[in-house]
Amino acid sequence: MFLPPLDEAVLQQEAHRLYGLLNSVSRSQGVKWTLEDCLQAASYTARINQLKKEKDAVILAHSYTVPELVCGVADFSGDSYALSRQAAQTAAGTIIFAGVWFMAETAKILNPSKQVIAPAGRAGCTLADGITAQEVRALKRAHPHVPVLCYVNSTAEVKAESDVCVTSGNVFDIAAALPQRELIFVPDLLMAQNLEIELKRRGTPKKIISAGSSCCVHARYTPQDAAELRRQYPHIKILAHPECRPEVCAAADYVGSTKGMQDYVAASSDKLFGLLTEQGLVNRLEAQYKDKKFIWSFGVCSYMKENTLQNTLQALMQPLPEQVVALSPEVIARARKSLDKMFELAK
Ligand code: 13P
Ligand code: SF4
């Protein structure tokens, strides 16, 4: 990709802007962003920020994408629920979605007249790839009259087969609010177990029929990881995502979505947090709360990290066919119903 040189003053100004945002963020364990790192990133962020205005594009970035995208060019970053709301509301002609493919599909379903571009192309997700629409249809045949809840980490075709879509931020409330005592929940097997436990704890027990897979990042955490954190840091507050195993959730001080964890940190007077979740959220919190310390030892979503400044700039300049989301009107219409139901119940 040929890029004409940028004015040196513009580059320096952008590098210092980035450094102000990223100087407390870890690049790798124990290594923080330097001004030199920001100078390299600045040659892309300056161009991206200029070009997105010219092209009437909005950049949405999931919190798990790299911090130079989240802090440097995103107009909005957040969890799946917040991003889907933004995608539904945006007035921009083009949505650049830095996330994984199912998230870009969700943006298209919610705002089909927009061009939706995913810089990382068909970046996978072990959950979304863990069940097919055909398998959901088989589940429905085996359990007629049982409503199907699909986690947002699912393909558009799976959403089209479902009654209600849910995110990690609203799954417990929506499942509790439904009148039925039996629910099908796909495709997160571990979240299904957490859901059954949480519904019992709330006094609204339900049988959860589940199928699918688990998140390759969150399923790796063990209760020993939580115990080791407490051994090393007796006053630590441990936060876990509901994609973790039930034993891990039981060992945490708080279990919630990416946004839920951010809110917990914001409201807490504690200074030390152990995060059993993906690196990107840790980086966001490091950027936002410079007086707090975040312990994270592993957990990287390689799919999310396929979004880079380079492919974001390229996608803005000239998207490749495989970066542009295309869904049939029939799938959009059917999948939209399950998302609209979520927005209605999440109110
Ligand atoms: P959130 O719904 O918390 O954004 O999580 C999405 C995800 O992929 C977690 O692994
Ligand atoms: Fe999918 Fe897990 Fe990556 Fe989230 S962290 S996008 S659930 S693979």
Image (cartoon, rainbow, N blue to C red):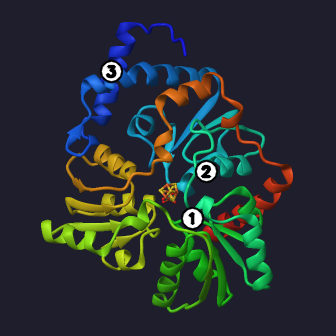
- Observer-side mark, 1 or 2, equals 2
Where is residue 177, by image quadrant? Answer: bottom right
In the displayed structure image, the side of residue 217 where residue 56 appears, left or right: right
Q: Is residue 262 above or below residue 304?
A: below
Q: Quadrant of residue 185?
A: bottom right
> From the viewer's perspective, is 322 left or right of 15?
right
Q: Which residue is mark 2?
A: 103
Image point (26%, 73%), residue name = 224
Q: Is ligand 1 within 8 Å of the beta carbon of the residue shown at mark 1?
A: yes
Residue 167: give its label: 1
Specify whether residue 316 is in view.
yes
Q: Is residue 153 visible?
A: no
Q: Amino acid at mark 2?
A: Met
Residue density around tag 1, few if under 14, some if 14–19, many if 20 or more, within 10 Å: some
Q: Earlier in the sequence, mark 3 or mark 2?
A: 3
- For the residue carrying disc 3, how many other residues have a C-alpha within 10 Å: few (<14), some (14-19), or many (20+)? many
**N-term mark: 1 or 2:** 2
Type of residue at label 3? Leu
Q: How many marks?
A: 3
Q: The N terminus appears in which quarter of the rendering? A: top right
Q: Are marks 1 and 2 in contact (CB under 8 Å)?
A: no
